[in-house]
Image (tube, grey):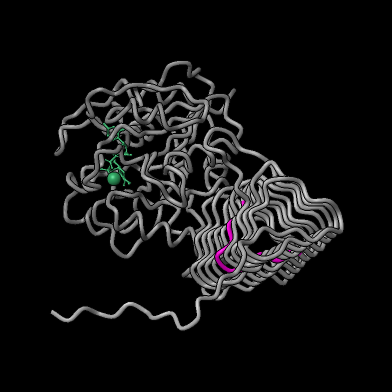
Amino acid sequence: MAIRIIVLAAGKGTRMKSSMPKVLHRLAGKPMLGHVLDTVSTVDPASITVVIGHGSDQVQQTIEHSVNWAMQTEQLGTGHAVQQGLEGIEDDDTVLITYGDVPLTRSATFKGLLDVTNKNQLGLLSLIVDDPSGYGRIKRVDGAVVGVVEQKDANEEELAINEINAGVLAVNGGSLKKYLGEIDNQNAQGEYYLTDIFSLAVKAGQTIQTVHPQDEWEAEGINSREQLAELERVYQHTRAAELMAAGVTVRDPARLDIRGSLSTGTDNEIDVNCVFIGDCSLGNNVSIGPNCVIIDSHIGDGCEIKANCVLEGSQLGSSCIVGPFARLRPGSELANEAKIGNFVETKNATIGLGSKVNHLSYVGDSEVGAKVNIGAGTITANYDGANKHKTVLEDGVSIGSNTVLVAPVTIGADATIGASSTITKAVNAKTLAFTRGDRRDIEGWKRPEKIKK
Ligand code: UD1
Ligand code: MG
């Protein structure tokens, strides 16, 4: 008695007007099919089978989940699609069927359906809606479900029914195989309807138990880019609500995007238009200014990220100040109280306790000690055209403005580099080093004048 999942994803998605299969279009940075597979995985299934057709190669290449793929070369209807995915299903298994273009169904909803399903009862996800058009209608007699009738096959009375089939169902494996063997395509669309199994089940003496999702959007499918955008907002609002419930001030929940996981402490503040991608985490009392993009990074307690910063693969200790307009590239590690100012780029660089890189600098492949001050316009020349080399600035170093540190190079503790220097060799501790051309003054020098034509 195992749980088996079948996900239908063979349809073309014509209304997306895309060369990419519909189920690969991304919601919150992840293909919509990926959301479905993540969620169905939480019900502990023995197998997941995805029925694919249009763009199957692309789907198989993109999706990283371990699933069984079933091919449906011609889209002859949802019933026909499920038939292609029956391999390995035993009679006493429970089969949960859902669609690859309905990305936001909650795990609890799937579990609710599985809970009501047994040998004699099918579980069906239904919804009462104001506008049922387009959906299959749920027919009841004396309160009991007797079948589902598709919009195109419905008579006037049936069209008025506002309880609809969301498309998700659970059924005992033996019953599913039996009923699928009995359905035909004698209907308005000439398709094999999966939904025909319900009336067959009722005729065979089984009952249909409906389950409602907590939220209507759990059952919403994506057919167009407009619907994709709508569900993206629904998803992002839910994420923002979770953050606020966890003690984060979100300046505008409509202007926050989380494309991955964001774990957070309390009393953090996120200003408008921030995007979090991949695995990110925030300590407590973190403030993130407007227009920041944070990718796979950890930001420690009390850090302040000012407006317009991009952080990727970076680790920040506590009480660091970054930005505005700073770019921290992968491998940037800031110790506590470090400061990275405007128009500074760091990459694969550790910046020690309380050290400052305040303006217009590039610090790459570097190890910067504690209490170091790097003046405006400092460049670590880490690349000789073939290989990357390391710059080491020991504790207490002070680098004057407009300095080029040609790596590999080490500047000893408490050394000072005079402004405008090009440093190609190690500098000893506590030493002042500078390279600078002699100054020349040409008195009374005349500026060129414009030649009259
Ligand atoms: C289906 C249901 C309808 C329900 C609605 C909910 C049937 C007959 N009807 O209708 O009762 O209210 O969903 O959204 O099941 N697919 C395949 N192969 C096929 C046909 C479809 O893989 O041959 C996939 C599609 O890619 C899609 C899903 O199945 O993900 C649903 O197909 P769709 O054509 O959208 O069904 P509806 O007509 O909307
Ligand atoms: Mg549909």
Which corner quadrant of the image does residue 160 belong to?
A: bottom left
Residue found farthest to the front: 443
**Residue 190: x and y, percent?**
15, 32
Magenta-highlighted stretch: main secondary structure? Answer: strand
Residue toward you, 18 or 180: 18
- Residue placed at 43% from the left, 79% from the top? 445
Q: Is residue 47 above or below residue 371?
A: above
- Side (left or right) of 92 relative to 72: right
Q: Nearer the viewer, residue 160 or 338?
A: 338
Task: Give the percent coordinates (x, y) of residue 263.
Answer: 67, 56
Residue at x 25% of width, y 22% of height = 73
Quick check: is 340 in the magenta stretch? yes
**Which residue sits at x=24%, y=56%?**
133
Which residue appears at 39% of the width and 39% of the height? Answer: 100
Report whether 416 appears left or right of 214. right
**Viewed as shown, does residue 440 lie left or right of 405?**
left
Percent position (x, y) of residue 2? 58, 24
Q: Is residue 333 left or right of residue 279?
A: right
Farthest bottom residue?
Answer: 444
Q: From where the camera sits, is residue 322 visible?
A: no
For residue 397, say whether it is visible.
Answer: yes
Does 214 appear above or below 9?
A: below
Where is residue 283 drawn, in percent x and y? 74, 61
Ligand 2 falls in which quarter? top left
Name the foreground residue: 6 vs 95.
6
Residue range corresponding to the magenta coloring = 338-346
Q: Quadrant of the N terminus?
A: top right
Quadrant including the C terminus: bottom left
